[in-house]
Image: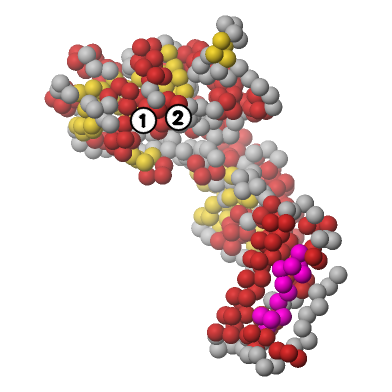
Amino acid sequence: MTIRQSNGSRDKSLDPGQALLRRLPGVDRLLFEMADDPLFSGAPKSVLTTAIRNVLENRRRIIRSGAASKSSPESTTAKDSLAHDRIIADIRIAVASAMAENLRHTVNATGVVVHTNLGRSLLPESAIRHILEIANGYSNLEFNLARGKRGLRYELVEDIICEVSGAPAAMVVNNNAGAVLLCLDTVAKGREVIVSRGELVEIGGAFRIPDVMAKSGAHLIEVGSTNRTHPKDYRQAICDQTGLLLKVHTSNYGIVGFTSSVSLRELVEIGAESGLPVMEDLGSGTFIDFSRYGLAKEPTVQESVAAGADIVTFSGDKLLGGPQAGIILGKPEIIGEIRKNPFTRALRIDKLTLAALESTLRLFRDEKEAVAAIPTLEMLTCSIDTIKTRAQALFRFLAPLEKKGAHVSLVESSSRAGGGSMPLLSLPTVCVGMSIDTMSAAGIDERMRGGTPAVVGRIEDDLYLMDVRTIRPGEAEIISRVFESLCR
């Protein structure tokens, strides 16, 4: 079916711009025509109507811009905008975009392992299977099967957290910022919290430790200087209003040079002298010592527990490699008080996150298994020889595109841990570089991000690079398909 358009005889009295606008098809006519088109059969009428209106409005803007400019509204661009097949094609694109999921698979070729904007840590296969199992049926989320009574969701992961970390008690909330807020509100609300000035970190989204502390009702007392803090600074600041000594691991930045800081063990000793609890916010907590794999030393959760901290908080994703969550370890009496806090319900963790967290934590019973099975750990500890092999494989896979106008190369570069973790760590890597004669690196980057799935790489020295450290098995085919469309 085609749309009958005006022959233009009645438009002679109108100015050229108005005449073109009159020739645009109506929404109802397009809806009637599309009813017989199988390509639109799965789309709801509301989606079709919105797509048609948006496409027609875009056509009107083109025509009006021509009328407002010095060029004639009867220009080729304006007339082409009335072509029936182009209108239908644009409606198809608009409908496909509206029907596609907003949250979708994206290829991370940036080399940033824990990429905050691309979803942070990838879950291990065992966690994915557990999520599917729990999502597909009922579960004992808050039901104690042994007693046949209501239970606590925190009990489902407390045993495994305590087993791996050595802590006497534990619970989890939805993220680490929430964990810090909850702990401060419970232990130090209305009282002073002493923290080193050099540890007042800002995390993603411009959220800062002082801001979180203010919301908790605690009063911040800064001690020391940006680069040097000593035990005497804490001792001199302690008074009757002090409620907590806080240590924050600067996991997302580093201070080098003339520096000095108070260790957690020293802070615990100061707390014991004054009868004050000590809390450590590890941020990107880890259960493994990365220095054993040739990487920078990061304080482990087990070390913080062994040092005697009364409360330890850290993220479930990032260096742990699990889902986004905030894990709280501590003395049983303190954890008990935290569970009673009304904020606990507002920050509680959901069943799917619990399923993923439990499965991830169980892998840490065997460190070798954890490093092999948890994608974040595998990517961080991957050897340069393995990286070179993967890069050469991707290079060979993309080499046939040379015949279609692309140029493929191998480039030595560096990867990053990301996610506010290991800020000074630079991981040697090999990237696959791609260039096209008729397109700039920025143009390639834009087109790759517009693919399905999207591919996100990086640009160095005006060359589009893809770091194989973060490219997952099976994604080479996706990259090749998107690049081939660019070459066409």
Q: In terms of depth relative to the viewer, which is nearer, 363 or 10? A: 10
Residue 352, quarter of the rendered image: top right
Residue 375, quarter of the rendered image: top right
CA neighbours of label 1 inside 10 A, class few (<14), some (14 to 19), many (20+): many
Secondary structure under badge 1?
helix
**Location of residue 49 in the rendering, given as x and y in whole percent from the top left corner:** 69, 61
In the image, residue 28 lies in the stretch drawn in magenta:
yes
* Residue highlighted by disc 2: 347
Q: In terms of depth relative to the viewer, which is nearer, 261 or 194? A: 194
The answer to whether residue 220 is visible is yes
Q: Is residue 258 left or right of residue 419?
A: left
Q: Main SS type for the magenta part?
A: helix
Q: Read off the magenta span.
A: 20-31
Figure check: 240 above or below 102: above
The answer to whether residue 368 is visible is no
Colouring method of the image? secondary structure
Q: In terms of depth relative to the viewer, which is nearer, 438 or 318? A: 318
**Location of residue 134 in the rendering, given as x and y in whole percent from the top left corner:** 65, 24
Q: Residue at x 55, y 46 (%)?
A: 110
Q: Are marks 1 and 2 in contact (CB under 8 Å)?
A: yes
Q: Residue at x 19, y 13 (%)?
A: 273
**Location of residue 476 in the rendering, given as x and y in whole percent from the top left corner:** 69, 45
Outermost residue on the bottom side: it is: 13
Figure check: 118 above or below 292: below
* Residue highlighted by disc 1: 181
- Type of residue at label 2? Leu
Q: Is residue 183 left or right of residue 353?
A: left
Figure check: 67 above or below 129: below
